[in-house]
Image (cartoon, rainbow, N blue to C red):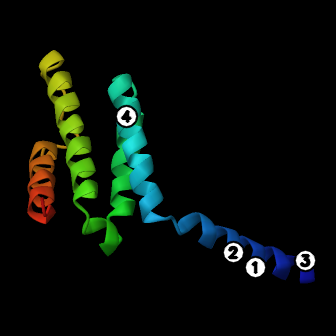
Amino acid sequence: MKKFIALLFLGAFLSNSIIAQDPGKDLKNAEKSLKQFITDETKLDQLNEGMRLLESAFTSSEISGQAKSWLTKGKIFNEVANAEFKRKTIDPAYQLASEDAAIKAFKAFAKANEITTK
């Protein structure tokens, strides 16, 4: 019984440390995912990972108040829109996974311009 309780506490501790991500690290990892996709456009999973990390990073008010983070978001959604445009051009029957990626990219760039003081 003592081993079970100890394992239960250990599991709770590990799950909290895994779930609690640093938004700054998530943003940096999203930037890395974008760079990996740009160097090799066949790595669509890197782009999807970047979008997932962005969602996690933007839960922080500190990250959502920085122009750099909005620029990163705009770049990632711009690449999503570009990749889907290329895919739709090659295969007209392809259903877009994110129809509003270009709009999200524009809004992110506009927000970055709004926040920027220079």
**Label 4–label 2 contact, CB within 8 A:** no
Q: CA distance from mark 1 to mark 2?
A: 6 Å
Quadrant in the picture for residue 90: top left
Q: Which residue is mark 3?
A: 3
Image coordinates of residue 91 in percent, x first then y, are 17, 19
**Closer mark to the observer between disc 2 and disc 3:** 2
Image coordinates of residue 7 in percent, x first then y, are 81, 73
Image coordinates of residue 70 in percent, x first then y, are 22, 56
**Closer mark to the observer between disc 1 and disc 4:** 4
Q: CA distance from mark 1 to mark 4?
A: 39 Å
**Closer mark to the observer between disc 4 and disc 2:** 4
Q: Which mark is residue 20?
A: none
Horizontally, residue 18 falls left or right of residue 88, namely: right
Is disc 3 placed on a helix, strand or loop?
Answer: helix
Amino acid type at image mark 3: Lys
- Give 23 or 118, whichever is nearer the viewer: 118
**Label 1–label 2 contact, CB within 8 A:** yes
Q: Which mark is residue 13?
A: 2
Q: Earlier in the sequence, mark 3 or mark 4?
A: 3
Q: Which residue is mark 1?
A: 9
Amino acid type at image mark 4: Lys
Q: Earlier in the sequence, mark 4 or mark 2?
A: 2
Question: Who's the residue at 24% across and 69% down the image?
Answer: 65
Q: Earlier in the sequence, mark 3 or mark 1?
A: 3
Question: Who's the residue at 10% across and 57% down the image?
Answer: 113
